Image (cartoon, rainbow, N blue to C red):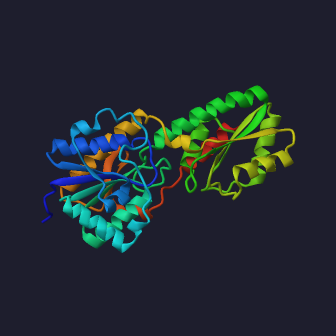
Amino acid sequence: MAKRIKKIAVMTSGGDAPGMNAAIRSVVRTCAYYRTECIGIYRGYQGMIEGDFVTMTARSVNNIIHKGGTILKSARSKEFMTKEGRQKAYENLKEHEIDGLVVIGGDGSFTGGVVFNEEYGFPVVGIPGTIDNDIYGTSHTLGYDTALNTAMEAIDKIRDTASSHNRLFFVEVMGRDAGFIALNAGVGAGAEEILIPEENLGLDRMLESLKKSKRSGKSSSIVVVAEGDKSGKTVYELANYVEENLPEYEVRVSVLGHMQRGGSPTCFDRVLASRLGVKAVELLIDGQSNLMVGLQDNQVVATDLEKAIKGIQEIDMELLRVSDIMTT
C-alpha cells in the first residue's frame, strides 16, 4: 500500500514557458484544497540539491496566473546528473518530510524525474512545460499556445514592413527539433513558405515557390523558418542563397528569439495549466507516480513518464498540405 502523501513539492526546471506560474498556482491551491502541505523548490534540481525550499500556501500564489516566466526560477543542474547530487537532493526532500514531487518542465526535466524515481522510489508526476510542444502524450504543452500567438503577431507586423518595401522576409522562430511553432504560426500568418526540421522540402522547391509568387503578382513574401530546419542551413545562409539565385528579391532576416518564451500566457495556457496542476496533485495523493499529465482529445490524461520522454510527437502532415494549398 502506497504511503499517504502529506507534503508535496513543486518545481520548474529547464527552459521557462508561459503558463508555468499558472501551473504552480494550481498545484499549490489543489494541495490547499486537499489539506496537503506544499513546498516550492527554487531553481529546479539545483535548488533541490541546495535545499532552496519555501513553504507555499494558497495566498502565496495570488496574482501570478497572468505572469510569464516562473516565480520559482529555473536552472540547469549538472550536479543532479551525478549519483552524489541526486543523493543530496533525496536527503533534503526527506529532511523536509516531502512525500511527492511535481516537476514542471520538458523531457530533460522528466528524465531527471524518472532516474530519481528509479533510484529512490520517490513519487514523481510531470507537467509538460515547453513552448516547442515536442512532448509525447499531450496535444499541447504549457506555453505552446502563447508562443504561437506571439510568433504570429510578430510575423503580422513584419508583413506590414515587407509589403511597404516590396521585400522578402525570412523569419526564424524557435524549434530546434520540432516545427510545431513554425508550421502553425506560418499557416496562421499566411507565410508563403514554411521550413521545418521534420521535412526536407529542398531549396529548389523554395526557389520555385518564390518565383511562382513573383509571377502571380506578389510584391512581398514571408518565409517562416524553424531554427532546426532540415536543409541544414542557417536562416542567414538561406537568405543569401535566395539573393544569389533570385536577385530581383530584396531579402531581410528577422530572428524572433526568446521573445517567444516570454509574455502573459493566453487564456488557453492558463486553463490548461490549471487543469494539469489539479490532476498532478490528485495522482500523487492517489498513490500514483512516474506519470505525466497531458491533454488528449480535450481530456486530461496520464501517460507513463518514460513513454512521454521516448515517444515522438508527430507533426501534422495534413497541416503541411493545407499550407501548400494556401500559397497558391
Relative horizontal placement of residue 216, taking residue 101 as reference (left or right): right
Viewer-proximal residue among 42 and 265: 42
Q: Is residue 40 above or below residue 51?
A: above
Q: Quadrant of residue 324?
A: top right
Residue at position x 76%, y 47% in the image = 239
Image point 27% across, 57% down: which residue?
101
User: Where is 314 relative to 144, above or below?
Assistant: below
Q: Is residue 273 visible?
A: no
Q: Report the side of 114 relative to 230 (left or right).
A: left
Q: Residue at x 36, y 59 (%)?
A: 45
Percent position (x, y) of residue 167?
A: 77, 34
Quadrant of the image occupied by residue 323: top right
| Residue 83 image position (x, y, % from top left) | 35, 73
Where is residue 292? Give x, y as percent.
33, 56
Q: Quadrant of the C terminus?
A: top right
> Percent from the top left, x then y, of residue 95?
20, 62
Q: Nearer the viewer, residue 262 or 139?
A: 262
- Name which residue lies at 33% across and 43% down: 23
In the depicted structure, whether residue 1 falls above or below residue 186 = below
